[in-house]
Image (spheres, rainbow, N blue to C red):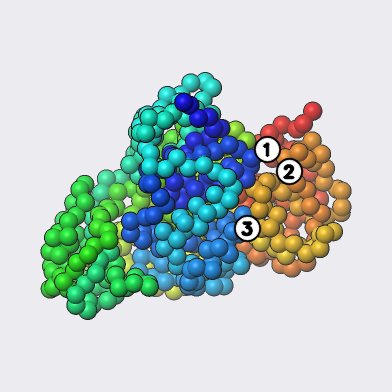
Amino acid sequence: MISEHAVAIAGGGPTGLMLAGELALAGIDVAIVERRPTQQLAGLRAGGLHARTIEVLDQRGIADRFLSQGQSFPTVGFHMIRLDISDFPSRHNYLLALRQNHIERILADWIDELGVPIYRGQDVTGFAQDDGGVDVELSGGQRLRAQYLVGCDGGRSTIRKAAGIEFPGWDPTMSWMIAEVEMSSEPALGFRSDAYGIHAIGKIEDSDRLGIVLTERQLTIGGEPTLQDLREALAAVYGTDYGIHSPTWISRFTDMTRQAAAYRDRRVLLAGDAAHIHPPMGGQGLNVGVQDAVNLGWKLAQVVKRTSPIAARVLRNAKAQVALRRMDASTKALNDIFTELLGMDEPRKRIAGEMSGLGIHYDLGEGHPLLGRRMPDLDLATANGPVRVFSLLHDARPVLLNFGEPGRVDIAPWADRVRQIEAGYDGPWELPVLGTVAAPAAVLIRPDGYVAWVGFGTQQGLAEALTTWFGPPAS
């Protein structure tokens, strides 16, 4: 028996779940194939949501589900330096500490409400694509037929490899052990550094378990470390293994950094770790995956044939943070300079904007500073009363906001795809990193919350932007 869907997603982690939600909102028949029999995750993994990711969730009306279960902090980290973002113009100018198992559970509940089926306990074992779609084979013997297949199946992506998409980048130079364990004796909590790098032990909330990250003395590639490996590494750094026992999870990561040479091969696409991997400094991996999904979802729903991933800059700043973790005298001197620089206002805002995702800028050409940046979540005055910008994006549809004379902007040929709102706003227009910008007469907002066109009293360029992003005018 063959089950048919418009889109099949391989992988039910944060990226796959978010993408499924985006497609479902657009009315697309989407299904997920997930190897785990339940959403349960071994270990807590990623530990937080950055400001722009929270904004993205707010754009879909589900941010409160996450905020109610996490803890907010007004800073983001670059290397070992905490950068304050509490003065950034956003309703969510903070980092939300929330573990990946909770994030996945909340997203899974959301897509269940949207009616997305999940083929659990199964892997994609192969696929064949033709001009009309993709035939997908599952490990349980079942077969799917989809118009598109999206690989959200992690750094070792089966989909990417089977599609023959190259994965160039930088080979690893350092490796770390990471684990969640219990200990018989009280450990030395916090960070510790030695000639080999930085190590850390910390308590995991609401449990007796501890999280450990240890820089390995020599690069080790492949193979999961054993409890004995962890004991020996702990003893080498701390002089004792603290009687570690009952590991929930032991793993290893490196500073390998790679990005797919293409995010698409005909009817097969990639998102999240399947498309780019980097060391987890700054906690950006999960966040970039969720933003990948939102960036891709509305375009795939429209069968637009290109993506605009933000991963390249994340890979760059992750590599910079790895470089600063080396413990030689030259790197320590460089670290001192970075600490001094990031104590200054402008460098802090620049790097914090990048880490939080609030400073993301798509190059959409010359024009108003808003062009290609996230639309601020303004409190608008409308004929139907006060409304927040983000609430207009809950259904993942594009919106044109006209702040000028009512009826001056005409998008009738796109009215079936783009919602137009006559709005008023009297306050300052503030953007993270850039500061105050001139108030526009109109803005066209993509479903992912980024500004695709800015008007100054004329419609110049509007038809072109509408056609580029949302298709030709209706006849």
**Callout 3: SS:** loop
Secondary structure beneath label 2: loop
Q: Residue 6, position in %: x, y?
A: 56, 32
Among the 4 quarters of the image, the one containing residue 226? bottom left
Front-most of 248 and 368?
A: 248
Q: Position of residue 126 (x, y in %)?
A: 37, 29
Residue bearing the label numbered 1: 470
* Residue furthest out toward the top: 131
Residue drawn at (55%, 53%) of the image: 110
- Residue 255, position as x, y percentages in the image: 29, 53
- Name which residue type carries label 2: Val
Q: CA distance from mark 1 to mark 2?
A: 8 Å
**CB atoms at circles 3 and 2 under 8 Å apart?**
no
**Which numbered circle lies on residue 271?**
none
Q: Which residue is mark 3?
A: 61
**Disc 1 and disc 2 in contact, CB within 8 angstroms:** yes
Q: For this rendering, which residue is in front, 454 or 177?
A: 177
Which residue is painted at 54% across and 38% down in the image? 30
> Which amino acid lies under the numbered mark 1 shown in the image of this protein?
Phe
Number of residues whose C-alpha sits closer than 10 Å to that of mark 1, classed few (under 14), some (14–19) or many (20 or more): some
For the C terminus, the quadrant is top right
Spot occupied by residue 3 in the image (x, y as percentages of width and height): 50, 30
Disc 3 versus disc 2: distance between alpha carbons? 19 Å
Task: Please tell me which residue is depicted at 33% across the width and 48% down the height of the picture.
Answer: 257
Kindly identify the amino acid type of the residue bearing the numbered disc 3: Gly
Q: Tell me, for residue 418, which label it has, or none.
A: 2
Residue in view at x 47 percent, y 48 percent: 15
Q: Secondary structure at mark 1?
A: helix
